[in-house]
Amino acid sequence: MIKLKLKILATLALISAIGIDCTSLVKPATAQTAASLAYHLKQAGAKLYGASWCPYTRRQAQLFGDVFSQVQYIECYPNGRNGEFNSQCQRAGVYSYPAWVIGGRTNEGMMSIQQLANFSNYGTPSNTNDKVKICDYKADLIFYERNPQMLGRKISSSQSSLANEWSGIRRNIRGCQ
């Protein structure tokens, strides 16, 4: 066990010495996947706690690109690194950044899009067994993947082509006719 720990430390030292930025190894999501996942996280009530001065928090936000504004983000140090600690972060018990709180579970540390999707049960709405809600939710995910510019917006009656697109998506989901 000690030999393994020494090997890990030596590897980390080597990586640090040659200047590899490990955070750059996590790839940003495509715009479609980011939009769909952001929608899912919003529906699930997910919260991302972070600190703007933390490079891992910044990198976590970058994974979402333009749709990061749809993620519920709580800044733990709104007045900077030496400022007062946000009481929301304290109540959530978050002291390491970034930290995701989803469905009462907390995961501290940066997560890849795939890890975040798995942690948040992406692809299924939370707290329902209602077949209609599940079908609508799945249609929403596909719709937002195709139309990331619509994330966070309702389809108005004047946007019949979008409403028709959503209805067509829903009809094509197995078991959701």
Image (tube, rainbow, N blue to C red):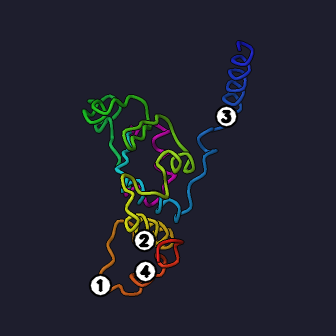
In the rendered view, tell whether residue 138 sits above or below residue 40. Answer: below
Q: Secondary structure at mark 4?
A: helix
Q: Earlier in the sequence, mark 4 or mark 3?
A: 3
Q: Residue at x 34, y 50 (%)?
A: 45
Name the mark nearer the viewer: 4 or 2: 4
CA gap, disc 1 and disc 3: 54 Å
Q: Is residue 116 left or right of residue 88?
A: right
Q: Mark number for residue 167?
A: 4
Q: Pointer 3: residues within 10 angstroms few (<14), some, or many (20+)? A: few
Q: Residue at x 41, y 86 (%)?
A: 161
Name the mark nearer the viewer: 4 or 3: 4
Q: Earlier in the sequence, mark 2 or mark 3?
A: 3
Report the amino acid beneath label 4: Ser
Residue to which mark 1 is pinned: 157
- Rendering coords of residue 120 (x, y %): 46, 48
Q: How many marks?
A: 4
Report the quarter where the N terminus lies: top right
Q: Secondary structure at mark 3?
A: loop
Q: Pointer 4: residues within 10 angstroms few (<14), some, or many (20+)? A: some
Q: Mark number for residue 149?
A: 2
Q: Which region is colored magenta?
A: 50-70
CA gap, disc 4 and disc 2: 18 Å
Q: Mark number for residue 19?
A: 3
Q: Earlier in the sequence, mark 4 or mark 1?
A: 1
Q: Pointer 2: residues within 10 angstroms few (<14), some, or many (20+)? A: some
- C-beta proximity under 8 Å, tags 4 and 1: no
Q: Earlier in the sequence, mark 4 or mark 2?
A: 2
Q: Residue 63 magenta-drawn? A: yes
CA gap, disc 2 and disc 1: 17 Å
Question: Which is more toward the observer, 46 or 174?
Answer: 174
